[in-house]
Image (cartoon, grey):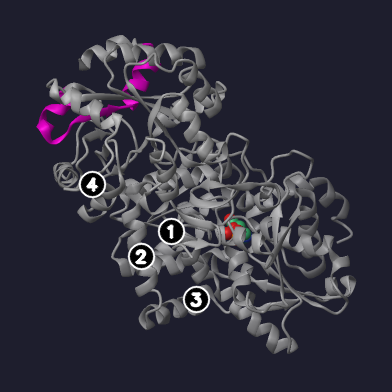
Amino acid sequence: MKKGYFGDFGGQFVAELLIPPLRELEHALKTIVPSPEFQAEFTALLKDYVGRKSPLTLCPSLSKELGFNLWLKREDLNHTGSHKINNTLGQALLTKYMGKPALLTETGAGMNGVATATAARALDLDCIVFMGATDVARQSHNVRRMQLLGAEIVPVQNGTKTLKDAINEALRYWIAEQRTHHYCFGTAAGPHPFPTLVREFQAVVGREAREQMLEKTGELPYAVVACVGGGSNAIGAFHAFVPDAGVRLIGVEAAGTGEKGCFNSAPLNLGSPGVLHGQMTMLLQDDDGQILPSHSVAAGLDYPGVGPEHAHLHASGRATYGTVNDAQALNAFMRLTRAEGIMPALESSHAVAWVLENRDQIPRGANVIVNLSGRGDKDMDIIEESLGSLLGQQGSKG
Amino acid sequence: MTTSSQTSRLTDRICAANKAGRKALIPFLPGGFPDRESFWTHLAALDAGGADIIEVGVPFSDPCADGPVVEKASIQALEMGTTLKWLLEGLRERAGQYQAELVLMGYLNPFLQYGFEKLADDAVAAGVSGFIIPDLPLDEDAPYRAILQGRGMSLVPLVGLNTDLERMQAYAAVSTGYVYVVSVLGTTGARESFPAELADALARARKAFDLPIALGFGIKEPAQLAVFGDTIDAVIFGSALITHVREKGSVDAFMARWA
Ligand SMILES: Cc1ncc(COP(=O)(O)O)c(C=O)c1O
């Protein structure tokens, strides 16, 4: 297979000026990451700083209602509140080993921004974060966290003012500052070697979940379900299970409002192959190859592309990808919050919602793992706005 | 020095300007900018004003190797309804009208969605001599280069301050047309000065390539060129021209400065 490809997808479609830092990173991935020193330091950070391993929690009340066992892989319990920290600490540590003093990154929901700013503090690096102006407004809580952590935040006013444009701006900045900055790419997408590098650091999620499931039930799960934005929490959850042919791998894309022709964030289901942000992958685009705006109530899923390994798993059929709309995700948020006392991020709510919406497909007594990629506090404003009336009705009943 | 077997109209055109004792002039203008009608007027004026080669931009929604001036112009052109199809049809209708050689410069995705072979056929019919695709580096370009070069067109390589000699030689082994040397470690946009390492990069390019060297990114005015002497053969200007057009300056006046 061609270097940096997953089947027909992936590659390195970047400006020539970015080839040297990508080569440097490929080399680091091959030589530094597998070294015992790096692995020992990374594992220690995950344990003592992030709080791994994260629990695998059975949802007693929803399981009873559904007739099968719903398990949550609790990435929401990680330090900073999502899976993003697994990757940012890995890349920040690698940055140290590469001898660069600073990180740059992009963020949509702000979770990757917070996780990168945090890793920068933990490992004494400078940090600059590019964030679409729309996301700055709708994820203001995370903006304030990043500011407290001492990161410089650059609101991006171009294009759709969301994650896609933040990545454009970060790539531009990286061209100019490549000698001092490592681009801590926030998801398993972008030019090679990022999809592989990010998977490497997120794979701990699936490795732990697989072991925990075997320990608790003595068998492999019926299915592993995860939401897909760029695809890092999903590829992290899936990776250890890929060789287990009997385990269904189910990615969940955001369908937006769900109306026909609406803006969505479901390129695997509704897009076509193309090149954006350094990768050949599935994209939302028009007939002229212009990238379409995306939409999701979950800022972290609001991206018109997807990591190339998911495009490949989709094409090969090893994983399947469903969709969930904004309303279904909000509903799942409330269900999990009220039934189990666990408040999921709106991104993760999409994965929970897929299970609730597709319960008929799942056999009685099966074990289903949902990767609960993050916690919901960051989404309070959106949730209160969207569910205001609902909260009013349900408030007293609890 | 590596010799490319195929000589191209682009190479010939730059060499002819150099023989006449001047640097070849290569303006860049996004297709459909500032609007679809004025674009054709400006293109004709660039041609009449002495351009040797004109790089016509194919607008893309996400031009991530470009600075704010080119990005804004591209978005404006898209909002004006510019498409690759419209551009190729317009060029085909005018084929043979221009003295200058034409090069299409754009990101890969719109080219892919058009269908790359059809694109190459239609580009030939439109009188296009080459392509510049900033997000298509050597490692990915083989199938596309073969399609273009098979029809006598060039895929112009971009190299920069951080491109080492070996990499330049790898480009030289397969390239025709000219070499686009990017003057800064950065995106497009007019700049006041050039980094000290540029002289080294130009020397490496001279050693690696048997093709003319065109310097681009950050070039604003002729006075900036004096220091380069004969280390460059051609000069590319984009953002400065776009800004000039935006400020309602005439293209004739802009080109007159360089004559
Ligand atoms: C909690 C959470 N889950 C999921 C995502 C989506 O990213 P990915 O698909 O890379 O996991 C995000 C992105 O911000 C997030 O914050």
| Magenta span contains residue A95 | no
- What is the C-alpha distance between the residues marked 3 and 4? 38 Å
Residue underneath mark 3: A46
Q: Amino acid at mark 1?
A: Cys
Secondary element type, mark 1:
loop
Q: Which residues are magenta?
A: B223-248
- Give the answer, above or below, for where B158 lies relative to A328: above
* Neighbourhood count class around disc 3 (C-alpha, 10 Å): few under 14, some 14–19, many 20 upward: many
Marks 1/2 in contact by CB < 8 Å: the verdict is: yes
Q: Amino acid at mark 3?
A: Leu
Secondary structure under tag 4 reads loop
Between A252 and A393, the residue placed more toward the observer is A252
Which residue is label 4 attached to? Answer: B161
> Chief secondary structure of the magenta span?
helix
Looking at the image, which is closer to me, A132 or B42? B42
Q: Mark 4 belongs to which subunit?
A: B
